[in-house]
Amino acid sequence: MVLLGAHVSISGSIALSVDRARELGCTTFQIFTRNPRGWISKKLKDEEVEEFVRRRREAGYEVVVAHMPYLPNVASPEALSWRRSVKSLAEELQRCEMLGLDYLVCHIGSHMGKGIERGIAQVARAVNETISRVEAKCMILLENMAGQKNSVGSYFPQIRAILDKVDDQKRVGVCLDTCHLYAAGYDISVKEGLEKTLSEFDESVGLKALKVLHLNDSRGKLGSHLDRHEHIGRGYIGEEGFRVIVNHKSLRGLPMILETPQDEYGGYEVDLEVVRRLLHDA
Ligand code: MN
Ligand code: MN
Ligand code: ZN
């Protein structure tokens, strides 16, 4: 079975995310465990957790992914904001563990002008501190960035350098976002480019570490460094690009999660339909 899903809302209650994923026909899905726009999270209530776990079990979801909120920056060179970000990462990992989630995806972040080496060191420290503080089966996945100014982890050797500094490698992996790859300059829109990108990733990071794929087309051009997601087939990666991506032997077995826009063109149902057709036609 192909694991294909989307980032669904928890609006109303976390358990409702399961129903939303089901209605879309998702075979996996991603959530925020809380409102992603603030620093504060309300404590999870036992009933809330139990209801989510029950519905998930009933629906038979083997893999469920969480995404970190927007504000934390674990690459921050500033003591105060770094500290706050680590606290948030640890809190999220704890919440994921309570909910029985499999992976917690975290954007690698920004060094805010203090240099890539500093950023790499801060991310590794953040991860080490988090995994030593929170006992969890849930893995932390570092998500590649789009090559934005001061970003850390847009390129594979930087991700390798972070992982090399992590104390317990079993607790950390990688999530690759197709939009971010393309915007960073990896041309995955054509077969040769995808092969080159994946072999570079394998040599540098190792495909074993790759646990989740975020499927998003790119509104920005190759190397634009813009993190702007587009509907599958309507951006610069294009339908033909995605046909090769979703059917690639190194990727097809991974949980694939859409984070595409919900707009006048449509919601996830449209993009899921496109990806299913591409998987089927191959
Ligand atoms: Mn992300
Ligand atoms: Mn993503
Ligand atoms: Zn993005």
Image: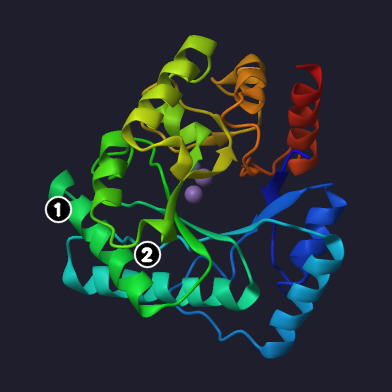
Residue sitting nearer the eye, 36 or 4 = 4
**Left or right of 119 on screen, residue 56:** right
Q: Is residue 68 above or below residue 51?
A: above
Label 2 element class: loop
Which mark is on residue 118? 1
> What amino acid is found at the position of numbered circle 2 in the picture?
Pro
Q: Is residue 137 above or below residue 231?
A: below
> What amino acid is found at the position of numbered circle 1 in the picture?
Arg
**Left or right of 110 on screen, residue 185:** right
CA neighbours of label 2 inside 10 A, class few (<14), some (14 to 19), many (20+): many
**Left or right of 53 on screen, residue 104:** left
Name the residue rendered at 46%, 36% in the picture. Answer: 207
* Position of the N terminus by quadrant: top right
Q: Is residue 47 above or below residue 266?
A: below
**Left or right of 185 on screen, residue 52:** right
CA neighbours of label 1 inside 10 A, class few (<14), some (14 to 19), many (20+): some
Image coordinates for residue 188, horizontal then vertical, percent: 49, 20
Which sits earlier in the primary sequence, circle 1 or circle 2?
2
Which mark is on residue 281? none
Image coordinates for residue 185, horizontal then vertical, percent: 37, 23
